[in-house]
Image (spheres, coloured by chain):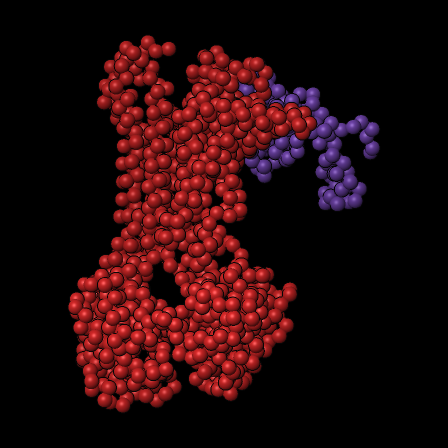
Amino acid sequence: MTDPRPRPKPPFKITPVVFHVLLAMSEDSAHGYRIMQEIEERTRGSIRVGPGSLYFTLNRLQEAGMIRETPGPEGDDGDARRKYYRLTEFGRAILGSELEVLTEIVELAREKRLLRDEGVA
Amino acid sequence: MGGSSSGRHGRLLRFLLYAYPRDFRRKHGDEIERLYRDVLASPPGGRSGLGLAWWLLRDLAGSAIRARGRLWRRLPREVAASLGTPERGRKRAMIATQIRRAFRSLRRDPGFAAVTVLTLGLGIGATTAIFSVVEAVMLRPLPYDEGDDLVWVMNRYLPDGRTGSVSRPEFWEYRQTGETFDGLAALTVHAGNLTGLETPVRLQGMRVSPNYFDVMRTPVARGRSFTSDEEAPGAPDVVVISHRLWRSALGGDPDVLGRTITVDGRARTIVGVTSPDHTPLAPYLFPGRTVDYWLPVAIDPSEFDAQSLELHNLYVVGRLADGATPDRAERAMDETVARLERLYPGISEAGNREVSVTPLDERVAGDVGSTLAIVLAAVGMLLLIACVNVANVLLARGESKLGDASVHAALGAGRGRIALHGIVESLVIGLLGGILGIALAIAAQRTLVGLAPPELPRLDEVGLNLRVLVFAAGVSMVAGLLAGFLPSVRLFRGDFLEALKTGGRSGGVGGARTLLSRGLVVGQVAAAVIVASAAALLGRTLVELRAVDPGFETDGLLMADINATDARYRSLEGVRALYDLLLPAVMAIPGVESATASWQTPLQSGMSDWPIRTNEAEAEWVGADPNYVADSYFETFGIELLRGRTFDATDRARAEGAVILSETAARGLFGDEPAIGRLVNLDFAEEVWRPVVGVVADVRARGLGAEPRPQTYVPISEVPFGPIPDLTLTVDTDLPPDAFRAALSDAMRDIDPNVPIGAVREMEGQVAHSMGRERFLAILLATFAGAALLLGAIGVYGLLAYDVSRRRREIGLRIALGARPDGMLRRFVGRAVMMGAAGIGLGLLGSVATARLLEGLLYGVSAIDAATLAFVAAVVLATAAAASFMPARKAARVDPLVALRED
C-alpha cells in the first residue's frame, strides 16, 4: 500500500477535464477532435468539452510540459494537417500518479464494502 | 450546407476567435476553427440548433475569459518581478525612476500630455464636483455628538405604511417608554416677529420640549436651556436665542441673560444663548429654514381630548440608549401603542398603527437619493468615456512607442518593465488629471449648488474636505489605471521582434489594436447614448411640465407674507379689520390690478388631506386640501368659476358661513349631482354645516406634475381654529417686485407699523421652484450629455484620423489603382457611421435597461419614448458622421504620388 517513491507534483489542479484529456492521449497520440470524441465516449457524455475549453487545456498542458506536439501517424487514419499531441514522460507520470490516487480510493471503498457491484474493477 | 454557407461560417468563426488573446489565437486558432467545423458537422450528444449554438458560445466565452485571465494575472507578477529584488530601497528608487521617466516623456510630447490630462481632468472634475454634493447631502454624519444614535420618531399607519407626525397625547405616552431611548424630544417649527426694536424683524424659530438640547447634546454657551417644568401651562415665558441673534439684534449685550424680548407679541425672558458653532436641526429637516430662537413647547395633559389627539403637529427626535437599534426601539414601542389604544379607545382600529423609528440622517437625506444616484451614474459614464478616449490615445501612441520598447527589450528590459513604464505613465496622467479635476470641481461647486433643487438639505456644507479629496485621488488612480491598462497589456504582449525588424512602423499589433480601439469607441458611443437619452427625457419632462395648465394665472403675480402676530390680531375681527384696510390700500397702489389674501397659495407646501363630508346619510369622509381666502382670491389668481358664485358680503352675514369647492372636491362628494346649496362639514368634529356657494376649476396646487387634489375654500374671516397669523398677500401687477415691496411697506406703515412685510416672491419663481428637481437633473444631464457627445466625437475622430495616417500608403495605392477619392470619403465616413450605429444599438439597449431608474422623475413622457430615443440616435449618428468627416476628407485627398514615396 505505501509507496516509497514521492509522487510527481502537478503544476496545476488536475480537474476531471484535464484528467480525461490526459487519459485520451495515454495510448497513442491524438488530435483535438479525437480527444473530444474519446472523452465523450468514455464518460458516456457526462463530460463534454467544447473546442475552446479543449484548446485552453491543451495549451496549459503544453506550457507545463505535460504534452507535446507530434507528427501525425502515417497511414489512412492520419490527417497530416491536424496537430497531434502526445504525453511527455512528465505528463505520463502525472497521469500515473492520478490513477494511483483513484485506485487507492477504489481499494479503500472495496475494503469498506462501499461498492455495490463487487465484480466491476 | 453548401460551400458558400461554410464560407460564411468561416468568416464568423474567425471573427469570434478574436475573443482569445493574440498569442493563443495564433497558436491554436486554426485548430479551434477546424474543431468547430467538425462539431458543426456532427454535433456531440445529438445537440442541434440553438442548443448547440448556446453550448459553443458558452464554451467560447468561458475559455476566452480564462485564457485572457491567465495573461492578465501574469502581468502584475512580471511587473513586480521587474522591480527586482525585494530590497525596499531599491524598489523605491526604481519606482521613482519610472515616475521621473513618465514626466520626462510627457514633457517631450506636450500635445499628447495636454490632450490626455485635459480629458481625464474634465471627467474627474465633474465626478468630484457631483461627489462633493453627494458627500455633504448623504454621506456626511450629522454634526452632533454621537449623531448615529439620533432617530426620527413618527406614527406609522397600517396597512399602507404611511407615516405622519405625532400629537401631544401620543408624544406624552411615547416618552414614557424607557430603556430603549435616552430621551425623546418634541419639536415644531415656529415663526414670530421680534418687536420692540427700531423695525420689527420676522424671525424663524422652534418650539421644543425642554430636554431637546440634552437629546441633541448641544448645550447652550451662556445661561441654561429649559427646565422640565417650563413645558407646563402657566410657566414663565422664557426663550433661548441663537448666537447670531444675540450678536445682531441684541448687539452682543454681555448682560443678555435675564433681558426681555418681545417675540410674537409676548415678553419673554432670555435664559440662554447657544454657542457660535451650534447647528440647529430645523434646516436639515426643512431646507432653507433658519432658527434664531427656541421656545418651550407647551404640553398640558389635562387638556388631552379627542381633538388634541387628532392634531398631529409635533415632530419627535430621539436618542437611542446604548446598544439599542431602531428596529429594537420600534418593537419596544408596541406596548406603548397598545397602552395608547387602551387610553383612547377609537383613535385607530386595533393593530392599525405602530411607531416608526428611523435614523435621523436617513430622514435628513430623504428621497433625494434617487436624484443624486442618477447624477452620479451619469457622471460615472462621462468619466468612463473620458478614460476610453485616453486609452485610445495611449493605444495609438503605444504602437508608435513599440519601436522604442523593442529596443529596450533588445537591451534586456523585461516585458514587465516595459508594461510598468506604461502603467506608471498612465498613473501620472491620472494624477495630473486629478489635480486639474479638483481645481475644476472647486470652480464648478458654486454653480452646482446654485442649481440644486430646493429640497436638497445641507447644501451649505458642500465643499472640499478630506473625504472628497481622497475620493478624487482614488478616482484619478482608477481612471489612470483604466485608461492605461489595455495599452499596457498591448505593450506587454507586443511583438518586439517584428517591431525591431520593421523599425516599429507596423509593430504587429495594428489589426487587433484597431479592433480593440473600435470596440472601445463603440462602447463609448453607447455610454454617450445612455446619458443623452436620459438628458433628452428630462428635457422633454421640463417642456411637458411647462406646457401644463396649472389652473391659475402665473403671469405678473407677486406674493408677500404678512405676519400679523400682534395681540390685536388674535381675534377673527382683528384680522378682518386689518385686511379690510390693507386690501383696498394695496389696490390703490398704481399698477396693481387686483389683490387678495389667503392662508395657502398654490405650489407651496401646506396643510393637506383634511377630512370633509356631506350631511347626507352614509356620506363618506373625503380628503381635501383646505384654504382660507379673501373674496378676491379667484379673481386675482384667475381661477375659473364653473358654477354658482364666489364669496360676497352675504356670506359674512350668515352664521354658518360658506364654502367653495374645487371641481374634483365637488365630484368626490356629490358625483354628478349638483353641488350648489348642499351642506358640507370641514371643521373636524364640530357640527358646522356650510352651504356650497360655488364650484371652481381645479388647480395643480401640489406641483405642475401632480394631479389636482380636491380643494375647499372658506372665507378668511371664518377660520374655525381661530385667526391665522401668517397670511399671504397676492397681487396681480406689472410692477417689479422691489417697487411693489416699497409701495406695500408704505401702505402698511400707515395701517400698522408693527407688522413686518416678508420677502416679495414672484409666482413665476414659485413655478420654477416647483420644478427644481427636474430642472437640476435636466441641466446637469444635458451638460454631461454634451460633454459625452463631444468626447465620443473626439474618440471617433481620433481613431479615424489615426487610421488614415497609418494607412496613407495603402490609400495612396488604392487611389493610384483607380479608386475614386469620393469613394474613399464614403468609406471612412461609412466606417464611423457603422461604429456609431453599433454604439447606438448597444446604448439604446442600455437606456431601456436603465429606464426604471428614471421613471419616477419623468412627466408626460415614457421612460422608453420612441421619439426621444430616435432623436438621440439621430443626433449621435450625425455627430459620429461629422466627426469622421475631416479624417475622411484627408483620406480622399491623399496624393498617391506623395504617399507612395513616403517611407
Which is more toward the observer, B840 or A72? Answer: B840
Residue B563 sits in which quadrant? bottom left
Residue at 74% x, 38% y: name it.
Answer: A106
Residue A61 sits in which quadrant? top right
Residue at 58% x, 27% y: name it.
Answer: B96
**For this view, does B689 lie left or right of residue B146?**
left
B425 shown above or below B591: above
Which is more toward the observer, B104 or B880? Answer: B104
Answer whether residue B589 is visible to the viewer in this image: yes
How far across and down, in percent of the image, does residue B502 sit?
A: 45, 12
Residue B793 sits in which quadrant? top left
How far across and down, in percent of the image, does residue A31 sit?
A: 56, 23
How far across and down, in percent of the image, does residue B34 sit?
A: 48, 24
**Colour assignment, chain B:** red
Answer whether residue A95 is visible to the viewer in this image: no
How far across and down, in percent of the image, does residue B338 sit?
A: 56, 80
Which is more toward the observer, B658 or B737? Answer: B737
Residue at 27% x, 80% y: name it.
Answer: B578
**Colour assignment, chain A:** purple
Quadrant showing the C terminus of chain B: top left
**For this view, does A32 lie left or right of residue B811?**
right
Quadrant showing the N terminus of chain B: top left
Residue at 30% x, 41% y: name it.
Answer: B873
